[in-house]
Amino acid sequence: MRIAKTILLLPLLLTLSCLALPAQDAPDSTINALIRKHGLEQSRLMETASWLTDVYGPRLTGSLLLDQATAWTLETLKAWGLEQVHTEPWGPFGRGWELQHFEMHVTEPSYFPVLAWPKAWSPSTNGSVSGEVVYLDASSEEDLEKYKGRLKGKFVLLDTLRATSPWFGGTASRLDAGELLDLANAAMPGQGGGRRNTNFRGRSNPFFRQLTDFLYAEQPLALIDRGFKGDQGTVFVQGARAKNGSAYADTAVVLPQVTLSVEQYNRIFRILQKGIPVRISMELKAEFSNTGGMEHNIIAEIPGTDLKDQVVLFGGHFDSWQAGTGATDNAAGSAVMMEAARILLETIKESGVRPRRTLRLALWTGEEQGLLGSAGYVKEHFAEMKDRRVQALKPEQGKVSAYYNLDNGTGKIRGIYLQGNDQAGPVFRPWLDAFKDLGATTISLSNTGGTDHQSFDRAGIPGFQFIQDPIDYDTRTHHSNMDVYDQLIADDLKQAATIIASFIWHTAQRDALLPRKPVVVGDGTAGGK
């Protein structure tokens, strides 16, 4: 009932557009039946996901495990029968980081082990170190003066208490009819859809720079925070903050930085409030590698036929953060896109029908540091860029029909974001309707941000991210120690791979490229559609 209600209330413009549906956009039921068979009944997706997480996770950009995951993926894609399987460099990135050992304990006033994770690119300590805990209660340069000369050799708490409460409604959810209706009725978006700033204290705050300079001058043993979310053993943690610039830069100066579980952070904080000293011991061993080196994206193809010089791109980011094994972010998307390629190979083999356009799988690295891998690929192949703005388009840009991306966790696909490309809606409507029984119904004009489709959208290539059920992506798994294989939902991911394989196929078989939005080039003029 919920699905039917959503379909009936889709925007009138899209509904009327479908009445005059061109024959070329009617879904091929024979091909879709084969795609369903290989995607839903004969899936190999979860085995792929286990290799990427259990064996080769986490996959921090620049790390040895990422290199090993890349090597395994290249061999797997070749074994499946994809062609032109290779890596393409981008960068230079900076230095890689590998955590080799970490432990933390409160030793006074009573002993307990601490649940915590080092931030990526934190340097090693000099063996096991021990010191008192100090809460840095400062919000101005004047406040900092009280701590001058008092922080060296100490563990510095940067946050106040954070209240927690029970999750009476649960941590996981699916999109309901009302939420899907809101997405379907969304207005044409303006500019935006960027990444959220989650820097502690906020880099836009002038005090942030003063605080950073002060801390690096004082040289404490480690900086400790408890994150802005996460509880009941879930710790959200990302990268360390350097004295200047990025922590992964070859010359970056970085203090050890650790994120604690909120409950243990709060306990330490409350003990300090009572005037009782707290001591911590910690040992952190980490190795930096690949200094100044290039990083690599993974590329593989299924060649086309009469339109083989044109391309349908599909992919997701391959890298992850360090606390979990990068399952929902984004082994899920990588495994789904690899599985979509495998499904299409099996469909081609069984049907004897080949795609008209070349199908190109791309798995990006450096996404977590700012879409670096996909942006590098776009710059190399499709557009001259400056500050993420198009200066000139390259010939290859006009030969890409679409880029499809998946990067919002383990939830099933409920539809697709048009990213403001209203002309693509009538094309997608019959393709999506073929999967109404799997819960995919909604087409939204909305932008969505923070994923690699933005690199293509900026360059005037139709770039799309699929609408997914949130499950517990934001509440439990995204960038946390709980981002592990066991949080993946097999049936949801199989559904996603099946739908995406169908979208890729039908994009490849159209007579024309997908409709395009105008792209702003150079001085602000719009060019190309």
Image (cartoon, grey):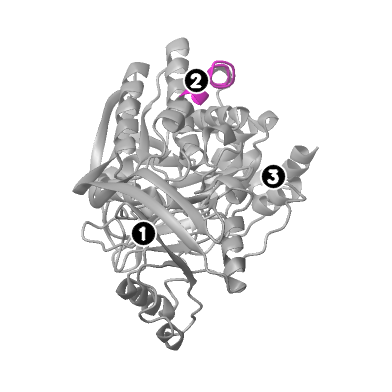
Q: Amino acid at mark 2?
A: Arg
Mark 3 and mark 2 lie on one chain; the one further toward the N terminus is 2
Does residue 412 sit above or below 339 in this rendering? below
- Along the line of sight, which residue is nearer the eye, 297 or 386? 297
- Along the line of sight, which residue is nearer the eye, 292 or 33? 292
Q: Amino acid at mark 3?
A: Ser
Question: Badge 3 is on which residue?
Answer: 173
Q: Secondary structure at mark 3?
A: loop
Position of residue 119 measured from the top left corner of the image (x, y, whole percent): 41, 54
Q: Amino acid at mark 1?
A: Pro
- Along the line of sight, which residue is nearer the eye, 438 or 4? 438
Residues under numbered marks 3 and 2 in contact, where contact means CB atoms less than 8 Å apart: no
The crowding category of the residue bearing disc 3, from other C-alpha atoms within 10 Å (few below 14, some 14 to 19, many at least 20), is: some
Does residue 262 sit above or below 154 in this rendering? above
Question: Badge 2 is on which residue?
Answer: 44
The crowding category of the residue bearing disc 2, from other C-alpha atoms within 10 Å (few below 14, some 14 to 19, many at least 20), is: some
Position of residue 91 measured from the top left corner of the image (x, y, whole percent): 23, 50
Q: Secondary structure at mark 2?
A: loop
Separation of marks 1 and 2 at Cα, in angstroms: 41 Å
Q: Is residue 346 left or right of residue 487?
A: left
Question: Badge 1 is on which residue?
Answer: 256
Magenta residues, start to end: 35-47
Separation of marks 3 and 1 at Cα, in angstroms: 36 Å
User: Does residue 16 appear anywhere in the picture?
Assistant: yes
